[in-house]
Image (cartoon, rainbow, N blue to C red):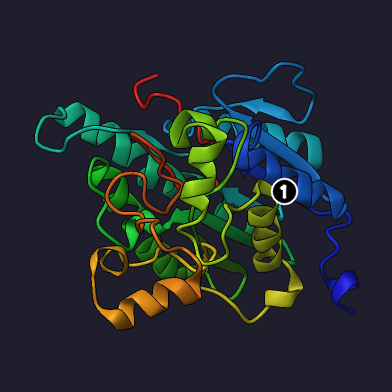
Amino acid sequence: MATRELSFDGAVVLVTGGARGVGAGIASVFREYGAEVVVCGRTPPDGAGPDFVRCDVRDPESIAVMMEQVLDRHQRLDVVVNNAGGAPYADAAEASPRFHDKVVQLNLLAPLHVAQQANAVMQHQKTGGSIVMVGSVSGRRASPGTAAYGAAKAGIDGLTASLAAEWAPKVRVNALAVGMVRTESAQLHYGSEDGIAAVAGTVPLRRLAEPREIGTCAAFLASPLASYVTGASLLVHGGGERPAFLSASDSEGVRSVRRIGGVSGVSGVGGVGGAGGAGGAVASSGGHDNRRENVDE
């Protein structure tokens, strides 16, 4: 029963930012479940196939053109995964107003505009549709060095709940709050293999997520298995961050927790580089390419 219900045979799925990184992992999972997948981005990847559509999701007119292309080709749209986003490191006190505007535009307003145009299609389909927002744990805790990004991702949770209430019952809207993910660009943010291993050691599950694991969670929320789930945000972070005080405290009780946890000597992730896919100087929410395109590109 579960296998049948997780089938997307005949469904049309759009994944924004789905050509590389976590987005590519999400797209691959939906393809494995039988969906016709369309991915979009500003720059086509090497070897881009007919399933790639060029689109700048920050531009509502570009989104409209993309939607027309999807409908011309497939005549329907069943699932949208709003994955595109990201932001480079910047001190909030020194970043320009234009920089902050661009970060919020990409990480909050763009998903809203894509969802709005997708909803206009789905409301007229007999089977409605499902929208999955790729958020970040950066929106659920302090995000120093990526303040505008963290604020935008916090907005994704509120946006998800509001759209779910407005667009029910035809369209379900849910979100993923994603932690650190290992992509092809992980070394740019976490350093060497030793550095990646040390960062992974701060996560209760002792590893970073794989891109397809984010994809399977998105597929679940979009599937009939989650037919009574809307307005929800699913944490996908391997258990989250170990509190930094566990490494700093000299309490015997805390030391015993460290021994039981098996991470004595490994500090908790804090500040920039914390969960949410943030590594080094770049903020991330899982679904996005950890390489991070500059928001002004």
Q: Position of residue 184 (x, y in %)?
A: 62, 32
Local secondary structure at mark 1 = strand
| 106 relative to 141 in the view: left or right | right
Residue that extends furthest to the left in the rendered view of this protein = 93
Q: Nearer the viewer, residue 275 or 215?
A: 275
Q: Nearer the viewer, residue 296 or 180?
A: 180
Q: Position of residue 202 (x, y in %)?
A: 45, 58
Q: Nearer the viewer, residue 164 or 81?
A: 81
Image quarter for residue 130?
bottom right
Residue at the (47%, 32%) spot, across then down: 191
Q: Up-down: is 262 above or below 187? A: below
Residue at the (39%, 66%) spot, across then down: 242
Q: Position of residue 204 (x, y in %)?
A: 51, 67
* Residue type beneath disc 1: Val
Q: Up-down: is 68 above or below 221? A: above
Residue at the (36%, 54%) spot, across then down: 269
Q: Up-down: is 65 above or below 29? A: above
Q: Tell me if mark 1 has few (under 14), some (14-19) or many (20+) residues whose alpha carbon lies within 10 angstroms of its own.
A: many
Quarter in which the C terminus is drawn: top left
Q: Nearer the viewer, residue 233 or 185?
A: 185
Report whether residue 124 is seen: no
Report whether residue 222 is seen: yes
Q: Which residue is mark 1?
A: 13
Residue at the (51%, 45%) spot, across then down: 114
